[in-house]
Image: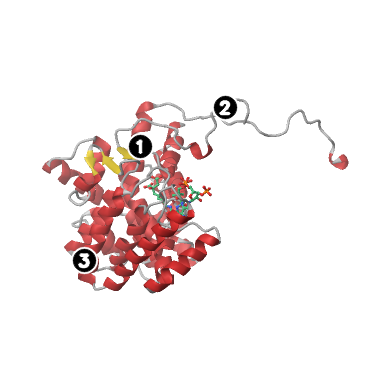
Amino acid sequence: GSSGSSFVAGLEGVVAAETRISGVDGDAGALTLAGYPVEEISGRASFEEMVYLLWHDELPNTEELAAFRGALAGRRGLPAATLELLRAAGARNVPQMDALRMAAGTLGLDAPDDPALDLVARLPVIVATYHRLLNGQEPVVPDPDLGHAANYLYMLDGERPGEDSVRALETYLNTVSDHGMNASTFAARVIVATRSDLVSAIVGAIGALKGPLHGGAPGPALDVVFEIGEAGNAEPVLREKLRRGERLMGFGHRIYRVRDPRADVLAEAAEKLFATDGDRDLYALALEVEKTALRLLEEHRPGRNLQTNVEFYTALLLHGLGLPTDLFTPTFAIGRVAGWTAHCLEQRSEDRLIRPQSEYVGATDRTWLPAQER
Ligand code: SDX
């Protein structure tokens, strides 16, 4: 507008919070998770350690970790109302993310004493239970002896997962556990800043994450690799998508002007999985698709530095773990709920309503006309 207002489309460049939870340097391509570079911590910490770190700003010692693992494992049972809702949703083939949003909303019903713990503990249980129901199978009973990530894999297919799979999943969950003021985290902070409850904030965040510009990208990113099928098709298929004005899923980022550091962390983890699982052709094809996409994006928006983002290798890693594409975004939520809840607690201690302004650009000084005269 001409009024000298400071409106910025998409709030680009606007700093909306101070946080100690994670820091993103978009020019250097660096991500810090509570002080630890993502490369330092993601492949080493258990997910329980990661959640504890984001909440308390310190890693737990042995006793604290055992107590925290136990507390999470003890909360895996779903309330009857949640199960009932998932069965009804399954009968109607409700998509995974919608079912997750609805089911997460029921977690406030039994008045939990610690909603953050409940949400972290139960999101994977909801997703795995719903996955079973959608596929006409009975849910698997959670195993309190398994860690958080292992139990999720176990509840998906009833098989106790191998160490490599658990490590790969934990690396993934840790890597995506938080990422500055991304859209879903911002949504959660806005909700909790009205002094609304944590369950409401996480339900809002799940809704924001679902969109294809945010957490909805990895499924479609892998679909493109499948659609391409062989290396020679990469260029024509991707060129045609760009010509039609489509966005290439898994590329570009609001903050990064260089390669997303998480892409490398996940690429390394994915490569290990594919080395043992024999799906090497797909991995090689994906690398070809990435190379071609980067070349075409540089032609498409010269100088914009559109780079690979976290979602491209998320797709490969989760596929390598045997997860179907409809579980990719829900699994993102299972990792990101660590950051969402940490941000809610941080926002609460700040206790300041988030309420920006808008610039009015509509008509002025209209006079009322009765309906029959319009
Ligand atoms: C996540 O914010 C976070 O931190 C998010 C996240 C997290 O951890 O929480 O990192 C997770 O959401 C990753 C992003 C997943 N989304 C996708 O992969 C979808 C495809 N990418 C885009 O649609 C896009 O790059 C965004 C949404 C990610 C970023 O949007 P911006 O910041 O609005 O894009 P931009 O300003 O960099 O775009 C500049 C130009 C535009 O063209 P013009 O308007 O100038 O003509 O580049 C174009 C864009 O249309 N462009 C693309 C493109 N990304 C940007 N063109 C084709 N394919 C793409 N992927």
At x 23%, y 59%, the residue is 269
* Residues at circles 1 and 3 in contact by the CB criterion of under 8 Å: no
User: Which residue ends up furthest to the right in the rendered image?
Assistant: 373
Where is residue 9 shown, x and y percent of the image? Answer: 53, 38
Quadrant of residue 370 within the rendered picture: top right
Q: Amino acid at mark 2?
A: Ser
Of 22 and 59, nearer the camera is 22
Of badges 1 and 3, the one in the foreground is 1
Residue highlighted by disc 1? 343
Look at the image and tell me in which quarter the C terminus lies. Answer: top right
Q: Is residue 248 above or below residue 8?
A: below
Residue 160: mark in rendering: 3
Of 323 and 253, nearer the camera is 253
* Residues at circles 2 and 3 in contact by the CB criterion of under 8 Å: no
Mark 2 burial class by Cα count in 10 Å: few <14, some 14-19, many 20+? few
The Cα–Cα distance between marks 2 and 3, rounded to whole angstroms, is 58 Å
* SS state under label 2: loop
Residue 5: mark in rendering: 2
Where is residue 267 shown, x and y percent of the image? Answer: 27, 58
Quadrant of residue 180 within the rendered picture: top left
Where is residue 23 shown, x and y percent of the image? Answer: 31, 37
